[in-house]
Amino acid sequence: MTHRIKKRLIWPTMAAIGVISVSACGGSGDSATSSASPGENGQPSATAAANGELAVPADADEATKKKYIQENAVAACMRAKGFTYTPHVSSDEPAAADPVDGQDYAEAKKYRQKYGFGLWAKAVYPNDPKLDNDGPANPDSSYLRSLPMSQQLAWKSALAGKTGNEGCLKKGREKAYGPDKSQAEIDRQTAEDRERALANQQALNGDSQLVALAQSYASCLTGDGINVTTTQPTSIGDMVKFQVGDQVPAGGVQSVGATQARAKLTQEIDLALKDLTCGKNFRAAYFPKLAKHPFEGVTG
């Protein structure tokens, strides 16, 4: 149960940048015309220049400008190598409550009554958009699928190099932020971030109110016949969901027949609703405190 930030991706349409034809030797095709990408509520979220790059919003702050500079530089680098790359910028927005996690009790109850935790439901309702947790689609996915495998590999190599952090990605990053930090600097920042996250996690797990509510939560689950494996405030909220997830076969929920999947979903819904009811008071206290003490990247 970690604090989430929603990412909104901004990119021009494929028509805006054109699909650059890639020959066996990696040559590029013609440039394309200007357009804009559809944003939220169908409105353009950014305007693409004639060369397919994103126009930096006039009111963008410095951090946002650097994101645009980086993405446009990556796109220019890929074009120079004969490939299409659609620049896209993610903007941090306040996280909307996950419909399953119980921050909004009424919303979570409505969700869980149909989908449970959203695990086996993916086999029963395979095309339901409420179960799509993959985020926005890669705008270059259709382009990549149109290429032979050798050129798909060449595209990935041009973008990220052998390490996954080189190639045009590195050039774009350096264009926006300057030379990469030394490994020592990266290690120091990583250590500081982890130390801060651990301190936040410990603060939540040591909170007397949350500890008492977690114990009541656990007692309720036990009374409903559910095995309790942890009473830590940072772990108990996802405990039952993880237990259900552990029962999913290695081949995924789609690997079983429809009849079995529906039976599994019925069981999951029952557990999900019991978990929601038992944890109502706990979650009402937990999420406001989590917002003040986020611990992303640290297991609960």
Image (cartoon, helix red, strand yellow):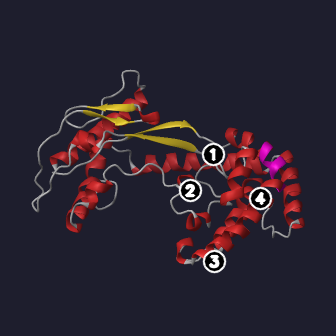
- In magenta stretch: residue 183: no
Of label 2 and label 1, which has the lower sequence position? 1
* Left or right: where 1 falls relative to 83: right
Does any portion of residue 300 appear in the rendered image? no
The nearer-to-camera label among 2 and 1 is: 2
- Give the label, 3 or 1, closer to the camera: 3
- How many neighbours does mark 2 have within 10 angstroms: few (below 14), some (14-19), or many (20 or more)? some
Left or right, residue 209 beside residue 191: right
Q: Callout 3 environment at 10 Å: few (<14), some (14 to 19), or many (20+)? A: some
Amino acid type at circle 1 is His
Q: Say which label, 4 or 1, has the lower sequence index.
A: 1
- Look at the image and tell me in which quarter the C terminus lies: bottom right
Which residue lies under the disc numbered 3?
A: 260
**Which of pointers 3 and 4 lies earlier in the amino acid sequence?**
3
| Mark 4 or mark 2: whose residue is earlier in sequence | 2
Q: Around disc 1, counting alpha carbons within 10 Å, would you say few (fewer than 14), some (14 to 19), or many (20 or more)?
A: some
Nearer to the camera, 197 or 261: 261
Picture coordinates of residue 69, whole percent (x, y): 31, 34
Give 188 or 293, whichever is nearer the viewer.
293
Query: Residue under circle 2?
Result: 131
Give how far apart the Cα atoms at labels 4 and 2 are. 18 Å
Which residues are drawn in magenta? 278-284
Which element type, helix, strand or loop, lies under badge 3?
helix
Q: CA distance from mark 4 to mark 1?
A: 23 Å
Q: Are marks 4 and 1 in contact (CB under 8 Å)?
A: no
Between the C-alphas of marks 3 and 2, the distance is 19 Å
Mark 2 element type = helix
